[in-house]
Amino acid sequence: MEITNYLGLAAILFAIGATTVLLRRNAIVVFMGVELMLNATNLAFVTFARIHGDVTGQVLAFFVMVVAAAEVVVGLAIIITIFRSRRSASVDDVNLLHS
Amino acid sequence: MTASGAEAALFWVLAPLMVLAALGLLFARKAVHAAVCVMFVMVGLAILYVAQEAPFLGVVQVVVYTGAVMMLFLFVLMLVGVDSADSLTETIKGQRWLGVLLGLGLVVVLLGVIAQAAFPPAVGLAASEELTNPVALARVLLGDYVLAMEVVGVLLVTAALAGLVLTHRRRLSVRPTQRVLAAARVAALPQGSTLTPLPAPGVYAQNNAMDTPALGPDGEPLPHSVPRVLRIRGQERSATAVLAEEETLVARDDLRVLGVGPAADTTVEQVGDPVATGTTDEGSDDEDGEVR
Amino acid sequence: MDTQTTMQTLSLAPWLVATPMIGALVLLVAGRRTDRWGHWLGVLASAATFVVGLVMLLDMLGTPADQRVGTQTVGTWIDSGPLHVDLGFQVDPLSMTFVMLVTFVGTLIHVYSVAYMDHDVDRRRFFGYLNLFVAAMLLLVLADSYLLLFVGWEGVGLASFLLIGFWDGKRENAVAGKKAFVMNRVGDMGLIVAMMLLLATFGSLSFGTVLPAAGEGATAAGQGVLTAVGLMLLLAACGKSAQLPLQAWLGDAMAGPTPVSALIHAATMVTAGVYLLVRSGPILEAAPDAQLVVAIVGALTLLFGAVVGTAKDDIKKALAASTMSQIGYMMLAAGLGPIGYAFAIFHLLTHGFFKAGLFLGAGSVMHAMDDDVNMRRFGGLARLLPVTAITMGLGWLAILGVPPFSGFWSKDKIIEAAFVGEGWRPWVFGLAALLGAGITAYYMSRLFFMTFMGRRRWRPDERSGDDGAPVRHPHEAPRLMTWPMIVLAAGSVFLGGILALGDRFVTWLEPVTGHVEHHEPVLPVWLLMTLTLALVVLGAFLAFRQYWVAAVPVEPPPAPAVVRAARVDLYQDAVNESLVMRPGQYLTRALVYSDRTAVDGGWLGLAGGIGRLGARLRRMQNGYVRSYAATMLGGLGVVGLVVWVLAS
């Protein structure tokens, strides 16, 4: 089995995560789609580390995880705040920039 | 290098499951189901990391991602509303088609690029490993990327603070003190409330079942000791009936112990005749059987 | 022209222009403060200019004939590339003649205006404008280049506009001033084009360079160009001198105060066109076709003016038509070539005296008759206005060309010159001039008899006379008005004879016009003189019968088509309107319309289109995060596609 299969898996997971962002309206589910995308890229990084024999890929994946964690904290806090004021967790309701 | 047969098997089992779980995220109606699907994917990813000679990362994936991040998601789901389910109708015109089209297109393009790309022959990490994978990682992390690591540390602190600040709720009214609350309770006495906490079911009662009312100091049943739901449903049992049942059951037991047998059982249904069967194992002698 | 004069007073030349200019500035800038004595300052400025001119004239008379031409340059005006123009003053017999005419008649009219405008609040402003006019006219005749002449040309046009519309409370006065200015502008275009052609051909605009070059190098310059220049100069002259086809403004210009009509529209400004053509003699001689057109225009105008003059009841408009006709004589003379130049100027000089005198007399009559101008309401004024009647009578005889008055000497010479030549020309021009003389006699006599003779068509008070006649109290004009009239009448009587003695005037102008051999007319001179006198007597007699002996109707009687046409100036306004004005109006309307639809529509349409496009594009900003995410994903897909394509 080629190691590039992992990359294919990563690509598929990434696409599914992107489609979730597009199609789901619940803010938290959308956020989970974003997390899925990040994880897919992590998989790709690790696979490349293995291909090139360089641990730097894993280090990058590590950084992605850290940043994703920080991002989740802030993002969910924002969702809670919005929910408190609007009583709705739908991304379609935050459309005030509509022109 | 190519993967070994075991790894291939692991991959070909895990990969479709992960894809299915990801699709579950896409199609699940309830948000909690979606969260669980994502957790499955993440655990699967952790397994794949370990298979790909990145054990440290695999552990971190489980601990941080699945353990912390997804739990955070679930907590927020609980706060926001577990029941909120997406309706099936799409608000933006053509978004559904666009999403499907773009998703599939992206898959095709990415797979095409991957298939097209000429990768160097895979080397694997065995050669570059120092002692263990974490040590190798540490060498690079704290050596080449130490500045980035410090910055990311600052980022984490900032994120934590941000979470605090954003979810902080300000009181809009004065917080009532204990004195104020007590005075309010006293003032509400004429409306029929009680100052003392309600007794738990079973106090002054012969029975501590949920649907049996407790008895007050005056021996009267206290209706508020039964949960409101049961009262509304009409599933509350009257204390007397329970008592009677208990007595007959005990009596039967007594007779068995005494070896009398279930001969005298016709008086079991008779309510209102507490002393007919002569049960005396109820407790105190000065019981007058006037229990209702 | 190259010899510099030995005149000692040559340096005084700039003062001729500066003095009245200073007077004008003081009067116009200082404003109401100078109201009490401003008019006297105006008179003084004009008189001072006359004195300076007289000194220069006497000096010139003292210098030998071949040294009477000189230029006094004050400085350089324009020095830019090929164009070099000096602030120079050309002093020679031609310009000095005009200087004397303008300043002498001008000063007399200044004095007259003191009394005529006595009741006018804006008298000081009037004198300011009069001084401005004198300055501009002197600049015109003293300029040594076409460009400086043009400055004076425009200046007199401005002064004319300001003075015609002087009483601007009445709308028709302002309209008349505007009409004069606009029609003059058409002529000015001709002068500008001529200057452009001259600059392109000769590289200079000064008389000293252009005129000799035109004279000698006719083939070098190209006859076509010179013909074009000549025609353009003729156009300019037509505008300024009210000749066909630009003659329609002169009648309306009578809306201005009578001194203005006398000075500007009789004696001086309207003669500027003749001056221009005579000055440009060498150019015209090098372009015989242009010269022929000049003569034709002159002949046509003299007949046109004469015919119109016979039907006018407004005394000033009749005199205006007469002016148009007499200038036609001058144009005809100028178009006859070198033989005619001197006579054109001679007639210009004598005409200046007797026409100014006639106008001043008309002003006196109007002053007596409550500013009424309708001659059908005059009559029998000779006894009551004796000085006016006598001075106007002398002017009348002069203009008729009765010997020995001035007009006879100048006009008969023109008629003689008209009969000189070959082929059809002497006959056509000569007969036209002859006929014109007869009609002139008729209508001028008509004017005189209607005004001063015959029965009164007004009444002295309520009780006597016809009930329909207006009440008038005619009285002779004050002395400040009568003395200028008397002086001018004296000039009308004697000036012609004095100047004609021994052909001295012709000789006087020879440094400018060149010596001309005497040519014989196709008819003997004595015959021409007899014919002229006969026609004059005939015309006067017809007028006598119709307007002295017979009763003059107070309303214009029904008349044949020719007379009716003459009453409306031979439809000149209708022709101008339909040929020029209405097409111009339609053109501007069409341009406005096309500007609004095509140009504005195009730009607004473009702006609107962009606005609509923006509105369409704005729909992309629907505020939904998922739409934006879709856009981003689409972009990512495109990038991936490009990478895929490039990598393969």
Image (tube, helix red, strand yellow):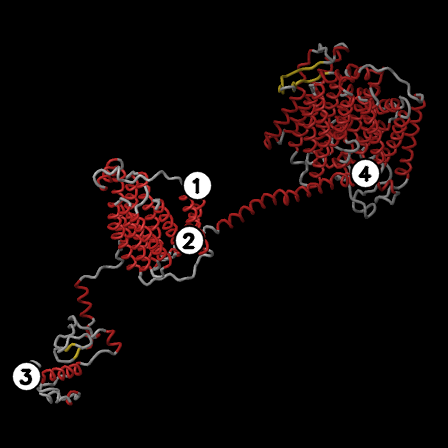
How far, Cα to Cα, is label 2 from label 3?
78 Å
Which tag is nearer the camera, tag 1 or tag 2? 1
Q: Earlier in the sequence, mark 1 or mark 2?
A: 2
**Cβ atoms under marks 2 and 4 closer than 8 Å:** no
Kindly state the secondary structure of the residue where label 1 is placed.
Answer: helix
Q: Residue at x 90, y 38 (%)?
A: C546
Q: Relative to the observer, which residue lies in front, C175 or C448?
A: C175
Q: Is residue C37 above or below residue B224?
A: above
Instruction: Say which residue label 4 marks.
Output: C569
Q: Quadrant of the C terminus of chain C?
A: top left
Q: Are marks 1 and 3 in contact (CB under 8 Å)?
A: no
Question: In the rendered view, would you say A9 is above or below C368?
Answer: below
Q: Position of residue C128 (x, y in %)?
A: 65, 29
On the rendered structure, is C236 left or right of B21? right
Chain name for mark 1: C
Crowding near the residue tagged with mark 2, few <14, some 14–19, many ≥20 C-alpha atoms within 10 Å: some
Marks 1 and 2 belong to one chain: yes
Residue located beneath label 1 in the image: C643
- Marks 2 and 4, Cα distance to the nearest angstrom? 82 Å
- Residue type, mark 2 in image: Tyr
Q: Are marks 4 and 1 on the same chain?
A: yes
Q: Earlier in the sequence, mark 4 or mark 1?
A: 4
